[in-house]
Image (cartoon, coloured by chain):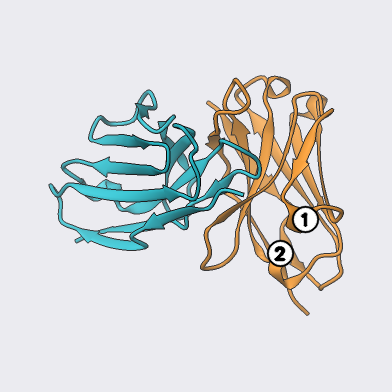
Amino acid sequence: ETTLTQSPAFMSATPGDKVSISCKASQDIDDDVNWYQRKPGEAAIFLIQEATTLVPGIPPRFSGSGYGTDFTLTINNIESEDAAYYFCLQHDTLPWTFGQGTRVEIK
Amino acid sequence: EVQLVESGGGLVQPGGSLRLSCAASGFTFSSFWMHWVRQAPGKGLEWVANIKQEGSEKHYVDSVKGRFTISRDNAKNSLYLQMNSLRAEDTAMYFCARATSDGWYGLDYWGQGTLVTVSS
């Protein structure tokens, strides 16, 4: 089973900041990582597929990078509406596994 | 618009059973793999099970094998999770999710979840 170690668990940002969230895999998973955003009471939203590809309709301030074992979600010029829970998913091998999640607060 | 709406959660005693449902709309349900994912309070997400388009192939996380059964009714655009021999550690919000069109590139749409609490 592939473990995804996501960090940080919590972060507080000011509008306009650049924010980075990390997911580290316990083994090489190529680019088989997706990123999601979830707000309380809402369905999760698909942000980034295959580590780096922005899902259509997602604002370009969101971006993803990485390959192999280290992956990063970056939010440039963060906005108040970006306050949410973010998590990564590896779909390289079953069982698919998730990072522990990051709660982002906007001051 | 793709919509996934879970139902069937509630309070159940240890050893009990519960059947979750997920009503799908806005897409051709029979063309997609479907998944269940859960999140225990204060914990990260855990993938639970998936099922192929026609239901011929299913996979489960080890912790639920032999206790949970995933199924679907394509005529009703519905996904199910039959949960038996429930344990306290099964307490979680349960989400249904749709796989990407190719089946193995992750999940593209999620429901809002239904809460299952296992407690005496």
Local SS, label 1? helix
> In the figure, what tint was chain B given?
orange
The amino acid type of the residue labelled 2 equals Asp
Q: Does label 2 or label 1 sit earlier along the sequence?
A: 1
Q: Position of residue A57 (x, y in %)?
A: 35, 26
> Furthest residue to the front?
A27
Taking the image as shown, residue A18 lies to the left or right of residue B44, namely left
Subunit under mark 1 = B
> Furthest residue to the bottom?
B120
Subunit under mark 2 = B
Gap in angstroms between the C-alphas marked 2 and 1:
9 Å
> In the figure, what tint was chain A given?
cyan
User: Which of the 4 quarters of the picture holds residue B116?
Assistant: bottom right
Q: Which residue position holds label 1?
A: B64
A77 w.r.t. B52: above or below: below
Local SS, label 2? helix
Asked if marks 2 and 1 touch (Cβ < 8 Å), the reply is yes
